[in-house]
Amino acid sequence: MPHIEIEISPQTNIRELVAALPIAADVMNAFGLGCSGCGVSKYETIEQGAAAHGLRVEPIIAALAQARLSGFVPSIDKEDRRPVRRAPGEFSGRAKIAHVVPVMSGKGGVGKSLVTALLAIGLRRKHMRVGILDADITGPSIPKLFGLHEPLLVQADPNAKTPQGQPLPLMVPAVSRSAIEIVSSNLLTDKEDTAMVWRGPIVSGVIRQFYEQVVWSDLDYLLVDLPPGTSDAPLTVLQSLSIDGVVLVTMPQALATMIVRKAANLVHQLKKPILGVVENMSYFAAPDTGKRYEIFGPSYADRVAELAEAPVLARIPIDPEKARLADEGRVEEIDDPICDELAEHLSAAIAARPKPKETISII
Ligand code: ADP
């Protein structure tokens, strides 16, 4: 065994540790911490990673120290692997969600889901606790981006019953490698208990269930990936949830701009703020020369921002590498300053438009 000098302490950076001591990745995995290979780990200490995943840091440090000595992953106590993610009091307690931010687009295919994911990653890189409610019921793509396939656990709520006297089902969110909590219709099976969730087959009803009948942890941000367009479903979310404001995703096409105008008007009619505009697939930067080509035409970002009365949060280039990682379920491996830019500008926009002091209480 070569003697490796890196210090193993709660403050050790995960990426640096794994680089110096590759077996550390296996130890992390044994604790269910898949974060050692993902972009967020670069910014996280062992303590921060453990906290994000709801684990105690001490057993992880002990196991890492043992693995360094022996060269093997030690066996890990079941209790030490069990995440404590729920809000205190579990089902009887209610999660506190500081900011709810729906991500909206006038039409499909502009990259709304990818932008939601990049924003979530950027916020996690700032050590925020983040959840994504995939409300795009007709085309749920969030789990695929994060490589999540396992159906959600559904448990009976001991404290609430349906009008028929049945226990109310409660969904437990999936947790991504970098500890982003995710709920999506794509993660529901047609098993009996899950079918209960679908009673009342109206899309807007399902979205409400995703908000209320989910055991979310206490979160700093809940991003809501809305269905595209201005149909009933996005309207319900905007009306019924206590949101901070909307992020509008667009791309550089005159038609898209018209559609965005409609979406912006709708949000304003509902007296909800638009926090910012993201122009996706804004341009393509040639990898060899860096020259920018406006593939879909000139940018309309400033025009859209004017219509929306909101700042441009980011202009995101067309990037085949991001599309590839997203397609392979490895979106969290995207290590791009655009994630930080999105997160920073969103936080600033929220700070500039504080919503009335209230804490949203949901299950
Ligand atoms: P929406 O949610 O608006 O329907 P998606 O996020 O599913 O759109 O994106 C549609 C497709 O475009 C996906 O295959 C996605 O990977 C790709 N895509 C989105 N943004 C970009 C980008 N900036 N560069 C390259 N491909 C992108």
Image: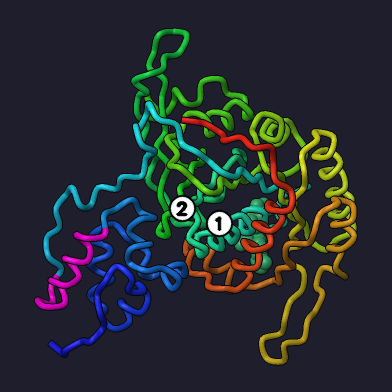
Q: Nearer the viewer, residue 198 or 276?
A: 276
Please state, as top left, top right, bottom left or bottom right, where the N terminus lies in the image. Answer: bottom left
**Circle 2 residue:** 180
Secondary-structure class at tag 1:
helix
**Circle 1 residue:** 120
Looking at marks 1 and 2 on the same chain, the residue that comes earlier in the sequence is marked by: 1
Secondary-structure class at tag 2:
loop
- At horizontal 13% and vertical 72% (from top left) the residue drawn is 72
The kind of residue on which mark 2 rests is Ile
340 on left or right of 218: right
Crowd rating for badge 2 (residues with CA inside 10 Å; few <14, some 14–19, many 20+): many
The percent coordinates of residue 205 (x first, y second) are 60, 25
The percent coordinates of residue 23 (x first, y second) are 22, 75
Q: Nearer the viewer, residue 195 or 91?
A: 91
The kind of residue on which mark 1 rests is Ala
- At horizontal 71% and vertical 72% (from top left) the residue drawn is 317
